[in-house]
Image (cartoon, coloured by chain):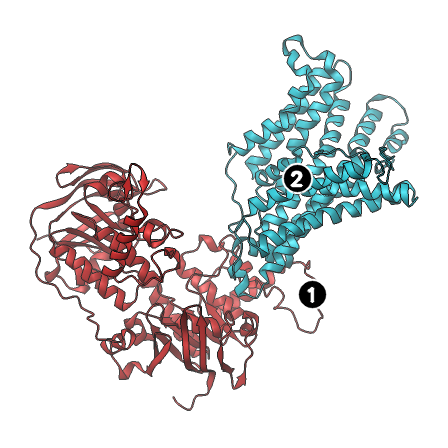
Chain colours: A cyan, B red
């Protein structure tokens, strides 16, 4: 794992460094670095949560390639609930969004329940069950989106409804603290404060995702629940012989995984942008899966990998500000879609196993027959 | 002896499986502090009975009493709470977990005082406390285990001790050992015997399931023999003999010593010259070995496991490359050729690990019967398999080699070990072969199957095939071989005529003693 964390750190430093290299004439490097880190943490959120979803499912022995679908379901149902609360029931923005987050969890959880029924009870091939989840989520969210919002005579009369907005950042008074501390509104000290503020000033789901990484790690490796979860993913019969209910443990962990994926969906429509588009998860569920594998099925490893993929996405976002400064011989980098390929290319490189091999749980993907 | 109380009493146990009556009105009892051996061939119903006692299966009829109390057996939890512990033949341990984690799994908070109320599932694991308890337990019963070790890194014998400690940690006073010696080296088996004596001395009662006759006579206090789902009888080592037990198990007289005539060796079929093989980690496992096997003779290779026999056989059968040296088969140089080239030249191979290297477990018997020659006529025509021919071939071999399978289209993985081995033997010996390499041909098999396979191997020899037998069982080597080579640390220490050597002498050479040069 050390080798892997080293690899991740080096790539992130290279990516941040390249943006600094391009933009340092216009903006102080420290500001660029802060901006890159802040964007990385933010855009890594759905990847982190998606990867945690995978960790819980697969540690208990159920392969989850349906993260993408669960995420999409969370995004749609969260968004839908927040609009209903706001427009139809007349609640104000914040409670509407919070109900939306709950609905996202329920949406992700229900799709996970379906995966659990297919994979654990009916012992369907788990790759196919996951694919079913993905296709079903695309179909249902796309269909409902059109029926509810764009059909004549629908609840919202064919008009795109007004969304109640997104979750606000935490707004910690870091800039103010530094202002008082430095005694000035300019200078290195103040810029440092501003930069730190930019990094820390994340929104609630992004912050919870980081907290959940450490909570998950503790739960998996230091609690009874975690020991039993890992045992049913490694050798379910051994767990069964000491009186552990394999089916219950797998069901519970798959549903927990669904909640994580649902929260990742909530990030997309209730924290990042206040809108839903069909297919908006855009492969994040699969990148999250790659992060889980690269992180060797551990929460902290998966988070590090999610940050790696997040930083590639942050590169694209931050490079846009300095489009004109890109040297002419690298003009192709001005097209944002070229840089936008970075996370996917990085995923492929990482998955070839050049940075060492990983070991999945021994019974991952194998249905348990009592 | 008879006045010791019964700690366990099973009466009239009956269990049906689809198509099989696995237990038919079986009664069994266990006294405090005794080793009661349950002897029977594969499929006799021993394991079914034990799984019933351990709560894994529910019997169709019959009842079980523990310490005189009727026991409701709905799950393993019930069995554990009644003080029954089981060490399964295939260990129920999680290789990536530490010894402590394996032992505490499912009983994570047993070390705490009772009555503290329910413990939340997210409570922190107290690994250190449990590790201390494990250390104490293993000391008390003379079981040497390190609680911090990762189970997957431990040798099989130690893993078995972990299983025993795991049962004792759950306060087991009745221990079921399912075929405990099947996976052990002779030294480890001796260790186990010592441990079993220590356990019974401290009041633990042991049910010992096996099909090895010698062990039963040396370890057990009482012996119950099962056959075809029924109890044949109960006896003691003093009242019985190997022959009698074998006859009870199989239901007829069994010839334990193989009858064979003197070998009539002719020309050399296999010549191995200065053969060097590295194992998969790159260490030199076979160090410049030379020998030959002639038509119509059996060369046995004796040696404690792990002295290069596995690598030697894998290289000879094309599974592992040799670093240097030559192999000639009927005078043709076949060093480092593919398994198919070797097979086509006339090599038959009964591999050490039948499930990994001998069979495709998820394939049917029909398909497994033609794994070596499915691609040519009459099994294939222009690249298309001929189902009728395949079936006819399987039906013929099933009949001829007495493979017990519900249907030729049963997956091989569902057959018993003995029948799986017969499928391999049928496939390998029904082809026109010149050389047979049989590595541990009877490992884990019951008396009846062993007798059968030994007879087949000798029949092959008498038909003029050159046979190379590798076995860790000295009895097997002594029974089959015409000449015996002893392997030690990757080298052949000596080669002798089977008739001119004693067991004791072979044992010394296997342990590294140098043969005096004449």
Q: Nearer the viewer, residue B416 or B86?
A: B416
Question: Image point 49% across, 59% down: which residue?
Answer: B93
Q: Residue A254: x percent and y percent?
A: 64, 51
Q: Nearer the viewer, residue B55 or A84?
A: A84
Q: Nearer the viewer, mark 2 or mark 1?
A: 2
Q: Is residue B304 visible?
A: no
Disc 1 marks which residue? Answer: B119
Q: Nearer the viewer, residue A169 or A9?
A: A169
Picture quadrant where residue B225 is located = bottom left
Q: Is residue A165 above or below residue B248?
A: above
Label 1: chain? Answer: B
Picture quadrant where residue B365 is located = bottom left
Q: Is residue A155 above or below residue B505?
A: above
Q: Secondary structure at mark 2?
A: helix
Quarter of the image containing the N terminus of chain A?
A: top right
Question: Image point 59% across, 37% down: which residue?
Answer: A290
Q: Nearer the viewer, residue B489 or B68?
A: B68
Residue found farthest to the front: A153
Q: Which mark is residue B432?
A: none
Q: Is residue B360 above or below residue A313?
A: below
Q: Secondary structure at mark 1?
A: loop
Left or right, A150 with reference to A244: right
Picture quadrant where residue A301 is located = top right
Other residues around mark 1 within 10 Å, as few (<14) / some (14–19) / many (≥20): few
Left or right, A358 with reference to B245: right
Q: Residue B247: x percent and y percent?
A: 25, 76
Disc 2 marks which residue? Answer: A68
Label 2: chain? Answer: A
Question: Image point 66% across, 27% down: which residue?
Answer: A312
């Amino acid at each position: 794992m050390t080798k892997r964390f080293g690899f991740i750190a080096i790539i992130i430093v290279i990516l941040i460094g390249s943006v600094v290299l391009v933009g340092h004439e216009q903006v102080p490097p420290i500001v660029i670095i802060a901006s890159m880190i802040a964007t990385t943490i933010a855009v890594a959120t759905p990847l982190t949560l998606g990867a945690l979803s995978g960790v819980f499912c697969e540690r208990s022995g159920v392969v989850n390639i349906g993260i993408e679908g669960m995420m999409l379901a969370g995004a749609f149902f969260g968004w839908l609930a927040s609009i209903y609360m706001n427009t139809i029931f007349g609640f104000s923005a914040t409670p509407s969004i919070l109900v939306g987050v709950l609905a996202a969890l329920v949406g992700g959880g229900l799709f996970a329940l379906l995966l659990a029924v297919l994979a654990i009870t009916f012992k369907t091939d788990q790759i196919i069950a996951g694919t079913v989840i993905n296709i079903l989520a695309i179909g249902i969210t796309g269909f409902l989106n059109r029926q509810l919002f764009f059909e004549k005579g629908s609840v919202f009369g064919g008009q795109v409804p007004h969304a109640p907005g997104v979750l606000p950042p935490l707004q910690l008074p870091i800039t103010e603290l530094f202002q008082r501390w430095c005694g000035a509104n300019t200078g290195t000290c103040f810029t440092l404060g501003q930069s730190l503020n930019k990094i820390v000033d994340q929104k609630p789901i992004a912050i919870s995702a980081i907290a959940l990484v450490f909570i998950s790690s503790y739960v998996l490796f230091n609690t009874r629940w975690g020991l039993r979860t890992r045992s049913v993913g490694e050798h379910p019969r051994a767990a069964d012989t000491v009186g552990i209910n394999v089916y219950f443990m797998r069901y519970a962990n798959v549903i927990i995984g669904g909640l994580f994926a649902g929260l990742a969906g909530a990030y997309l429509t209730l924290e990042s942008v206040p809108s839903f588009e069909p297919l908006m998860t855009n492969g994040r569920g699969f990148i999250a899966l790659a992060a889980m594998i690269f992180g060797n099925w551990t929460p902290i490893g998966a988070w590090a990998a999610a940050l790696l993929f997040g930083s590639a996405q942050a590169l694209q976002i931050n490079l846009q500000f300095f489009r004109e400064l890109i040297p002419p011989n690298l003009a192709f980098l001005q097209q944002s879609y070229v840089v936008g390929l970075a996370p996917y290319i990085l995923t492929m490189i990482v998955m070839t196993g050049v940075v060492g091999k990983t070991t999945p749980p021994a019974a991952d993907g194998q249905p348990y027959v009592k | 002896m008879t006045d010791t109380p019964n700690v366990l009493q099973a009466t009239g146990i009956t269990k049906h499986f689809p198509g099989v009556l696995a237990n038919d009105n079986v009664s069994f009892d266990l006294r405090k502090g005794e080793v009661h051996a349950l002897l029977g061939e594969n499929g006799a119903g021993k394991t079914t009975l034990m799984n019933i006692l351990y709560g894994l299966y529910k019997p169709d009829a019959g009842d079980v009493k523990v310490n005189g109390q009727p026991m409701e057996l709905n799950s393993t939890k019930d069995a554990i709470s009644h003080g029954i512990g089981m060490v399964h033949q295939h260990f129920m341990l999680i290789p990536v977990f530490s010894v402590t984690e394996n032992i505490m799994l499912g009983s994570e908070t047993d070390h705490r005082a009772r009555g503290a109320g329910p413990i939340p599932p997210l409570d922190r694991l107290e690994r250190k406390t449990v590790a201390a308890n494990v250390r104490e337990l293993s000391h008390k019963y003379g079981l040497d285990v390190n609680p911090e070790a990762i189970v997957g890194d431990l040798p099989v014998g130690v893993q078995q001790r972990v299983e025993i400690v795991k049962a004792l940690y759950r306060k087991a006073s009745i221990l079921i050992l399912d075929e405990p010696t099947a996976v052990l080296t002779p030294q480890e088996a001796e260790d186990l015997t010592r441990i079993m004596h220590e356990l019974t001395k401290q009041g633990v009662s042991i049910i010992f399931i096996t099909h090895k006759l010698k062990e039963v006579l040396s370890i057990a206090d009482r012996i119950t023999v099962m056959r075809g789902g029924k109890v044949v009888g109960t006896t003691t080592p003093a009242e019985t003999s190997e022959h009698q037990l074998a006859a009870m198990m199989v239901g007829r007289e069994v010839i334990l010593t193989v009858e064979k005539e003197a070998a009539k060796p002719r020309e050399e079929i296999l010549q191995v010259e200065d053969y060097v093989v590295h194992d998969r980690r790159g260490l030199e496992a076979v160090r410049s070995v030379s020998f030959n096997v002639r038509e119509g003779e059996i060369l046995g290779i004796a040696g404690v496991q792990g002295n290069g026999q596995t690598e030697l056989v894998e290289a000879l059968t094309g599974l592992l490359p040799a670093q240097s040296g030559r192999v000639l088969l009927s005078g043709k140089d076949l060093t480092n050729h593919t398994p198919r080239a070797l097979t086509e030249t006339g090599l038959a191979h009964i591999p050490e690990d039948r499930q990994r290297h001998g069979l495709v477990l998820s394939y049917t018997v029909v398909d497994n019967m033609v794994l070596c020659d499915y691609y040519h006529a009459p099994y294939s025509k222009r690249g298309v398999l001929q189902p009728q021919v395949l079936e006819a071939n399987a039906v013929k071999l099933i009949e001829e080699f007495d493979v017990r399978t519900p249907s030729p289209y049963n997956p091989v993985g569902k057959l018993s070990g003995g029948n799986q081995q017969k499928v391999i033997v049928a496939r390998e010996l029904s082809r026109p072969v010149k050389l047979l390499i049989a590595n541990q041909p009877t490992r884990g098999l019951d008396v009846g199957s062993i007798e059968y396979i030994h007879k087949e191997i000798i029949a092959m020899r008498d038909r003029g095939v050159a046979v190379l037998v590798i076995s860790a069982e000295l009895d097997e080597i002594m029974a089959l071989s015409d000449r015996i080579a002893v392997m030690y640390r990757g080298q052949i220490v000596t080669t002798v005529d089977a008739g001119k050597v004693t067991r004791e002498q072979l044992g010394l050479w296997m342990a590294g003693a140098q043969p005096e040069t004449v």
